[in-house]
Amino acid sequence: MNAKEQLDFIRDMVNEATAAHWEDVGLVRRLNSAQERVALRVAMTAGQWLVKSAALTPVASVITLPVDCSKPLYLEETGTGEPIDWLGSVTHRRVSRGIGAAVESGALEAYPLQATLEVNRASYVTGVTLWYQRRVPKLHTGDAAGAGIGSLTLAADANRVYLADYYTGMVLEQYNAAKATATYVTFRSAISAYTAAGVCTVTGTPTNAFAYGMISVLPEETHLLMCYIAAADALLKPSATIDEKAVDRVRADKNDIMRDVWQWLESRIVAGERVQIGEEY
C-alpha cells in the first residue's frame, strides 16, 4: 500500500470520505506515528528487515555515522574483513592511545560517541564497512506541485520533510488524476535523489498536479496494521465525534491484525535450523 491508499483507508474507518473533522495533514501525521511504532517492533525482530551497509572512511579514528543510521550493528575493515569489536562507552578507551600508534596491539575496537564511532587506535584512517539499522523515513502523499521528465516536486505541507536526500531510496507511485478523482496507479519509481526544495529525481515522466503516495520501507505485511493504529488514534481524539461501536470495532480489528503481524515477523527465521545431510540405513 502507498500512503495515498493508506490515507483513503483511514478515512473510511473514521467515517470521512472527504476532509471534514480531519484534514489530510492530521491523518498522515498519525499514519507516520503508527509507522514509527511498527518500525520499533520490526527493528527488534530477528528478520533484519531494516539492515543495510555503507563503506566509510575514518578521519583521525572517528567514523561519522550515515544520516539514516538508527543503530550501528557490526563494523569491520573493508580490505581485510577484520571485525572491529564494540566497547560500551568512552570510559573503556585504551590509555595507551596517549603514547602513540606504535604501541597499539590486539583486536580493533570502537565505541559510540554522539553521531560517530571512534576506533580505539590512534590516527586510524583505514576504510571500514558498517552494517546498521536504517531509520524509517516518514511517508508523504498529495498532488504533485511540479513534474516533468525525471522529476516530481512534492506538495508543500506540514508533513513534508525539508532535508536534502531524506526521501532518497523510497518508492513513489502516482495516480491517473488529482487526489479528488484519482482511481488507479499509472507511474511508479524509486527516488534516486531529493532536494530540500522538495524535488524528487525519478525514472520516467510523472504528471504535474496528479496524486502520489510513497510506499513505506517496512514489510508490506505491516502496512494495513499502520492504518488501523492511525485510525484508532484519530477516533480517540477528544474533539472527535465518537461512535463507540465503531471505535470498539476498529480497536478489536487492530489488536487482531497486530497479533498476526507480530507472529509473522517472528517467523521469518525459525529456530535457525540448517540443512542436515545424513545416510539411510
Image (cartoon, grey):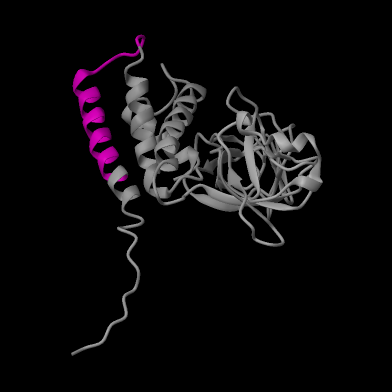
Residue 22 lies within the magenta run: no
- Whether residue 278 is visible, yes or no, is yes
Q: Quadrant of residue 118?
A: top right
Residue 246 lies within the magenta run: yes
Q: Residue at x 37, y 21 (%)?
A: 234
Expressed as whole percent of the image width and height from the top left, the position of residue 88 reads 55, 34
266 lies above or below 22: below
Expressed as whole percent of the image width and height from the top left, the position of residue 154 reads 65, 35
Q: Is residue 228 left or right of residue 149?
A: left
Q: Quadrant of the C terminus?
A: bottom left
Query: Residue 271 versus residue 152: which sits nearer the camera?
Result: 271
Q: Is residue 215 left or right of residue 161?
A: left
Q: Is residue 49 left or right of residue 141?
A: left
Marker count (numbered):
0
Q: Residue at x 37, y 25 (%)?
A: 16
Q: Is residue 104 left or right of residue 222?
A: right
Question: Magenta stretch?
Answer: 238-261
Q: Residue at x 52, y 23 (%)?
A: 25
Q: Main secondary structure of the magenta part?
A: helix
Q: Residue at x 80, y 44 (%)?
A: 101
